[in-house]
Amino acid sequence: MCLTKVRILAFAQRVHPYQEVVKTDWK
């Protein structure tokens, strides 16, 4: 469970910046 949480956290951290860039690019 702990490993899964860390994995999800790392994935979210990796995707968050990308989503922010796309949002800015879209606007």
Image (tube, helix red, strand yellow):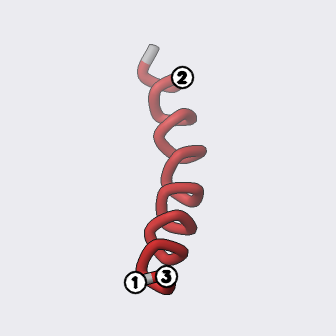
Q: Whole-percent x and y of residue 20?
A: 54, 34
Marks 1 and 3, how far apart in space?
4 Å
Query: Mark 3 or 2 closer to N-term?
Result: 3
Q: Name the residue located 53 percent from the left edge and 46 percent from the top edge.
A: 16
Mark 3 lies on a secondary structure that is helix
Task: State which quarter of the image contains the C terminus.
Answer: top left
Is residue 20 positioned above or below 7 on the image? Answer: above
- Return the residue at label 2: 24
Is residue 21 positioned above or below 8 on the image? Answer: above
Is residue 22 positioned above or below 2 on the image? Answer: above
Q: Name the residue located 46 percent from the left edge and 26 percent from the top edge.
A: 23
Say which of marks 2 and 1 sits in front: 1
Asked if the residues shown at circle 2 and circle 1 are in contact, with their CB atoms under 8 angstroms apart, the answer is no
Of residues 26 and 19, the one drawn nearer to the viewer in this rendering:
19
Query: Mark 2 or 1 closer to N-term?
Result: 1
Mark 2 burial class by Cα count in 10 Å: few <14, some 14-19, many 20+:
few
What's the residue type where badge 1 is placed? Met
- Return the residue at label 3: 2
Q: Which mark is residue 25?
A: none
Asked if the residues shown at circle 1 and circle 3 are in contact, with their CB atoms under 8 angstroms apart, the answer is yes
Task: State which quarter of the image contains the N terminus.
Answer: bottom left
Would you identify the image quadrant in which residue 21 lies?
A: top right
Is residue 9 positioned above or below 25 on the image? Answer: below
What's the residue type where badge 2 is placed? Thr
- Return the residue at label 1: 1
Asked if the residues shown at circle 3 and circle 2 are in contact, with their CB atoms under 8 angstroms apart, the answer is no
Marks 3 and 2, how far apart in space?
33 Å
